[in-house]
Image: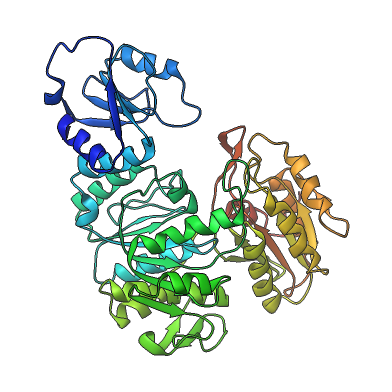
Amino acid sequence: MIKMTQVLDILKQDKNFRDISYKGGFAYTWKEVTFDQLSYDSRKVSSSTLFFAKGAAFKREFLEAAVDDGLTFYVAEKDYEVGIPAILVNDIKQAMSLIAMAFHGNPQKKLKILAFTGTKGKTTAAYFAYNILKQSHKPAMLSTMNTTLDGETFFKSQLTTPESLDLFQMMALALKNGRTHLIMEVSSQAFLVKRVYGLTFDVGVFLNISPDHIGPIEHPTFEDYFYHKRLLMDNSRAVVVNSGMNHFAIVREQVANLPHDFYGQGSANQIKNGQAFDFDLTGKLAGHYDIQLIGDFNQENALAAGLASLRLGASLADIQKGIAETSVPGRMEVLTQTNGAKVFVDYAHNGDSLQKLLSVVTQHQTGKNILILGAPGNKGESRRADFGRVINQNPDLEVILTADDPNKEDPHVICQEIASHISRPVDIIVDREEAIKKALLKTQKSSDAVIIAGKGADAFQIVDGRRASYDGDIVIAKKYLNRSLKF
């Protein structure tokens, strides 16, 4: 619960309060009002709800319907004149975050919070940290792939970083469930739209940066994307940074006065060998480590998680055991066909992550390699040219372009756009299941591979703004592993 006086104090301290706009007379002392619910969904309100009118697509009729359901106060950046008082603010997202913190009793002060940012690897690093910290602590995790607030039940999140009202509600529930630590993926969008406004992280980890999420509804430029990524460093008590990342010098200068660890090329904690399934470390994490996820980049994700967890109370034994136990749905999952050929399923969804995926696969599979790939609609348009560039750098790769969350765009047109950046003929099979079946039929021997990139463990397709039925890449690949099946 939160009192109106608390709400106003929070807004005034943040210099975010403008006025309470209401043309009628108050039939009661509004300063004595108490709210027992916060909401930004106009379908979920009552007379004791404080409602936030947010978003460019918000319409006056949403508020009118909420008033009909008993709503008595709302927070907004303008007065919609619907017959109830409007608490006017300069920034609705800032207001939401700070009020949500207070409403839920400031749970962020009672949890040790570890946040990962980067263009790729956030989910994998979060899984490593979760498995490390659960050895001696009770972590919760907010992840793109799976979220758990009790360590037992897992569910898929709608957003990489939840909206602030949901985020602090989740924190409070995690605390109620006896959790001691919280592991989060923090996207650039989370800072851009202020989902984590006012939140300070105990440890922030910057994994890498490459152009992505640049477009009309995301970041206008790479500079803007990189800036919002770096905000995690400004809002963390201690940081862990990949010294091998692009533009490292900028981040190094930014964190110079913070407690920090650097890892990667040229650091004291450098990975010593690139063998799959095991690696050695020097420095703070000196020792031998077993790992299920192949590829140097996954070893780096493990190292980042280990250094961060060490700062949060994990022992070296916890780190070794946690890394060895970690597997991630849809991240470098490997299946074997009856003819011995391998099938790799991975979430690689931009040019940089695709290049790293291909470099790992081609180290192990020296025969025919067939890539199945698509691009999402209405977001990350720059990826399409990036995919073409990476494919052109791998001339022996066979390519089948297919649907991958086309949303409101025509998936065939998306495939054609990707193909326009590729300097050789490729197949286009929009039906993703058909594309997987055809690729599996192309393999002949154990040195061949099918690489299914983009969706990872997602068991849906986003079509016209909604999740449409799709079995998932792993399920479909398993269905057709047996070459004796007739398609």
**Left or right, residue 285 beside residue 138:** right
Q: Quadrant of residue 7?
A: top left
Q: Residue at x 69, y 69 (%)?
A: 358
Q: Residue at x 46, y 52 (%)?
A: 144
Q: Quadrant of residue 352?
A: bottom right
Q: Position of residue 319 (x, y in %)?
A: 35, 77
Whether 103 is drawn above or below 42: the answer is below
Whether 84 is drawn above or below 190: the answer is above
Q: Position of residue 161 (x, y in %)?
A: 42, 49
**Left or right, residue 131 beside residue 24:** right
Q: Position of residue 233 (x, y in %)?
A: 40, 64
Q: Position of residue 455 (x, y in %)?
A: 60, 52
Give whichever of 280, 248 is nearer the camera: 248
Whether 324 is drawn above or below 190: the answer is below
Question: Considering the image in quadrants, where does the N terminus appear?
Answer: top left
Q: Residue at x 43, y 47 (%)?
A: 156
Q: How is the image coloured?
A: rainbow
Give whichever of 185, 8 is nearer the camera: 8
